[in-house]
Amino acid sequence: MELQQKIDRITDILRRDDGISGAMHYTEQISWILFLKFLNDFEEEKEGEAMLNNTKYDRIIINEFRWDEWACPKIVQTRGIASLPQIDHKLAKTGSDLTQFVNGHLFPYLKGFKSSLSDLKSVKYKIGNIFEFLDNRIASGHTLREVLDIIDTLNFQSQAELFELSHVYENLLQGMGNDGGNSGEFYTPRAVIKAVIETLQPKPGQTVYDGAAGSCGFLIEAFDYIIHKYRNKLSTEQWQFLHENTFFGNEKTPLAYTMGVMNMILHGIESPNIYKQNTLTTNIRDIQEKDRYDLIVANPPFGGKEKPQIQQNFPIPSNATELLFLQHFMKSLKKGGKAAIVVPEGILFQTGSAFKNVKEELLANFNVHAILSLPAGVFLPYSGVKTNVLFFDRTGATTEIWYYEYNPEQKLTKNKPIQYEHLQEFVELSSKRALSSNSWLVKAADIVDTDLSAKNPNTQTDIDHLPPSEIMAHIKKNDFVIGQLMAEVEQILEEGYNG
């Protein structure tokens, strides 16, 4: 059975459990079990490497709580000349014995890692971070037994299977996003993430930051980009820096934070610097050059409101979270650094005091070199808001902005989402800021009242330059249509009244 088929089988099993309700719950529960199996295989591999090198590896998990002890204890059965480990069903817990052990012993043990350690970069501390916000929701011990038996067949010491797992896990997270509601915070479409990272082109030795990390899709894509582009070219020091000191992020919601850390570890980043905190609680006046990052990529939440105490952390107060995040990212960018931030359409055209002041600072102190205009529907089903990606760097003031507008041939829907191919032309044209039917340049001096919204000159008909006779025809046509509609409304109202 292929890995995806096994995960599909597990989701079917979990849907029948009384403790599970929706994609968010079953993804959460599959995640912690997958993670513990991955951790067991990781420790076995480290132990094997140590033996080959005549050194000792001290395992993180003590014997009682290792996978092969509590989840799937083994017995060796000899068949001919081959010895095959099989689950020992006499020792394997099931039913209430299993749920009592997991809830009463396993989870308290793992949660305790965080409080007993001071090394914030250690894998053990990260495990404590993960389980601090997790609980077992699987009500039936028999259901849990079925799930454990399936996951036990996975081998995470196999690079091929580990690679496949990372993609399957992304699919699970995408399923949570497709559920809509608050679960959308976990997932930014892979097509958008890939296009953004390929445009930024991260390099070894750079630091990468996402202050609204969610499931860490941007950070993972940046990791994969560096791994593939610089394959076999990284020094030992660069490799260590990539795994320990490259990726940073914050996430305030517990489940999104947990998913993000697990997602990074399952993708091969052993010690991600992801912190469970609200980015906006940082007073940006205190951010110094040493606190800043080479690359910033984020899809921060928008449409929310923050308390006055939070707004005081920003020179330009606003109750619009997207405006606060933009100020934070501007302040957190190193000299010469690059940023790509997803923002709602409103931030570009609104000219209220706070919006205008932030954009004036952005244009004066940063080079807004590109704006990618995305259509409505990219973030369906949890949001239909039209969005843009702001690309800016800290290399001086803006002189000219290159715009690219993606216009889908068909309306984007939940079942027909955006694909990377849709944005491939943007990636190819962006490095040269080339002009096309979908792209154009605007001089900063020509921007009126900080309105940065995309207005494609290749598709617009400027009514100001039409002959007077055509302008009058437009007005008459609109008046005629409005008159017809008003007559129909009056007739409906009259009929309703007479009826």
Image (cartoon, rainbow, N blue to C red):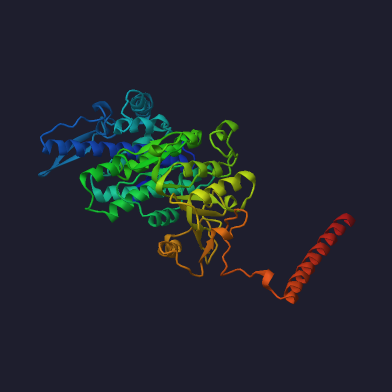
> Residue 59's spot in the image, x, y percent?
22, 30
Residue drawn at (35%, 44%) of the image: 207
User: In the figure, 174 relative to 257: above or below?
Assistant: below
Does residue 30 appear anywhere in the picture? no
* Left or right of 446 in this view: 473: right
Q: Quadrant of residue 155?
A: top left
> Residue 144's spot in the image, x, y percent?
37, 35
Comparing 280 with 133, the one in front is 280
Comparing 373 with 38, the one in front is 373
> Residue 239's spot in the image, x, y percent?
25, 45
Q: Quadrant of residue 129?
A: top left
User: In the figure, 96 relative to 386: above or below?
Assistant: above
Comparing 352 with 192, the one in front is 352
Does residue 147 appear anywhere in the picture? yes
Residue drawn at (56%, 70%) of the image: 458
Image quarter of the C terminus = bottom right
* Left or right of 98 in this view: 59: left
Q: Quadrant of residue 16?
A: top left
Residue drawn at (49%, 52%) of the image: 397
